[in-house]
Image (tube, helix red, strand yellow):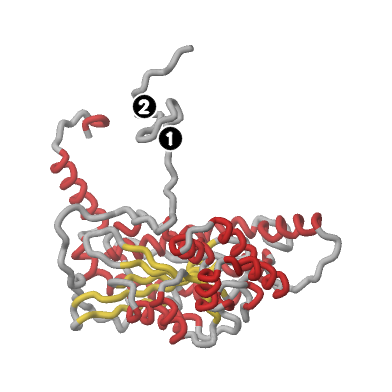
Amino acid sequence: MRKNYSVNVRYEKAWRAKEVALGLLMGSPRESYSTLHKYGQALKAVNEGTVFHMKLEDDTFFKYAFMALGCSIRGFGSCIRPILVVDGAHLKGKYKGVLLTASSIDGNNQIYPLAFGVVDKECDDSWTWFIERVKICIGDINGLVFIFDQHQSITNSVATVFPDAAHVTCMHHLAIKLNEKFRNEGMQIILAKAAKTFKISKFRYYWGQLAGFPRVQKYLKDIGFDKWARAYQPGMRYNQMTSNLAESMNAVLVHARALPITALFENCRALLQQWFYERRTAASSRGTVLTEYAEIILKKEAERVRYHHVRPIDRYQIETLILGYAEPVYPLGDEKDWILLDDYVPKMIKPPKFVPRVGRRQTTRIPSAGEVRQVHKCGRCGNVGHNRKTCRQPLRTE
C-alpha cells in the first residue's frame, strides 16, 4: 500500500482489510460450509452425471466432501488408460483439512483429473470413504492400476475397495524412504535399474548386485516385488514410475488450498473447464493420427531401432484425445443464478469441529527426509537470501 498507493497503514490493519476483501469476493470460511451443499446441487444440475457427496458429523458439522464432474467420469471410462494416481495435500486456510485427488494421464501425457475430496485428515476412514466414491464413479475396470506413496491408509483402502486392482509404489517416495533408512547413492542407482527393467533375467542381475546390501534386500522383499519392479507387476504400469502427476496437481492447486471450501471446489471446477477447452481446441487443430506426445516418442524409437513389436492401443490417437475432452465443463455463475434440482432440500452445515492453534498458521510444506530444497541465488551478485530486484550489494569493478 505504501509503495503503490502512498498510503501509510499499519501491517495489522492492511491484513484485516485484505481478509475483509477476500470475504466479500469468496465468502468467509465459516459461511462457505453452509453454501457447500447448495453448490453441489447446482453443480449436478448444470453438469450432467456429476457426483457430489458429503458426510456430516452429528448431522450438522462438516466431515468429508467429494466431487467428480460427469465429463471427467465419462472421459476416463472411454478414452483414458486405466491408471489412477492418488495423493493428499494439506489445506492452508482457517479450518484444517486435506485435499485428496485422483488423477490419470491422457494420450498426450497431460494430467487428467478425475475426482477431488476434502477430509479432516489422512486415515483409513477418510481414504476408504474417498476411494469408495471413486468406485461409484468408475465401477470395476479391468487392468486398473493405482499408484501412490507408501501411505498405509491408502494401501488399506485401495485393497479393501478395489481388491482386484493392482496397486504399486511411487519409485520417488520409495527412493526417499531407502535414502532415509540406509543412505547409499550406489544402491539407489542399482535399485532404479532393477525397478525399470521389463525382463526378469535383467532384474535378477541387478538384484544380485544388491546382495551387498542385505538390509535393503529384506526391506524390498517385504514390500513385494510386484509393488515396485516392472518385471513382476501383474498389470500394465504405462511407464508411470512415480506419482509426480499427483504432486503436479497439488502444485497447480497450491493457492486454491488456502481458499474457503466452496471456493476451493469452484476453483477445481474452473480449472477443469479451462483445461478441457484448451486441450479440446489444441487437439482438434492437429492433423496427425497420433497425439503430439506419441508422435515424438514414435519418431525417437524409429530412429533408434530397426524392428518393432507393435501392441495397438487407441489411447494415443488424436481422435481419442478429442473424445476425452469433447464435453464442456459448464460454469455456475453467481450464487443467485444457480440452477437447482427439483429435489433440492436446504441444509445448514457448520464448519468441522476443531481447536485452533495459537500462533500463525503454517502454509509451507515440511520437506521429506532426503528432500533438498532448491536454493535461489541473486542473478546480480550471486548471493542467497534475495533476488536481483532487491539486491543492495555494490558491484565490483575490476
- The span from disc 2 to disc 1 (Cα, nearest Å) is 11 Å
152 to 191, vertically: above or below: below
The residue where tag 1 is placed is 377
Amino acid of disc 2? Cys
Which residue is pictured at 66% across the width and 74% down the height?
A: 231
Residue 320, visible in the rendered structure: no
Residue 274, visible in the rendered structure: yes
Please provide percent x and percent y for residue 392. 34, 23
Give the structural element (helix, strand or loop) at label 1: loop
Place residue 63 in its image quadrant.
bottom left
Please provide percent x and percent y for residue 160. 44, 87
The residue where tag 2 is placed is 391
Which residue is pictured at 60% across the width and 61% down the height?
A: 109
Amino acid of disc 1? Lys
Precedes in sequence: disc 2 or disc 1: 1
214 to 368, vertically: above or below: below
Which residue is pictured at 78% across the width and 71% down the height?
A: 310
Please provide percent x and percent y for residue 370. 44, 56
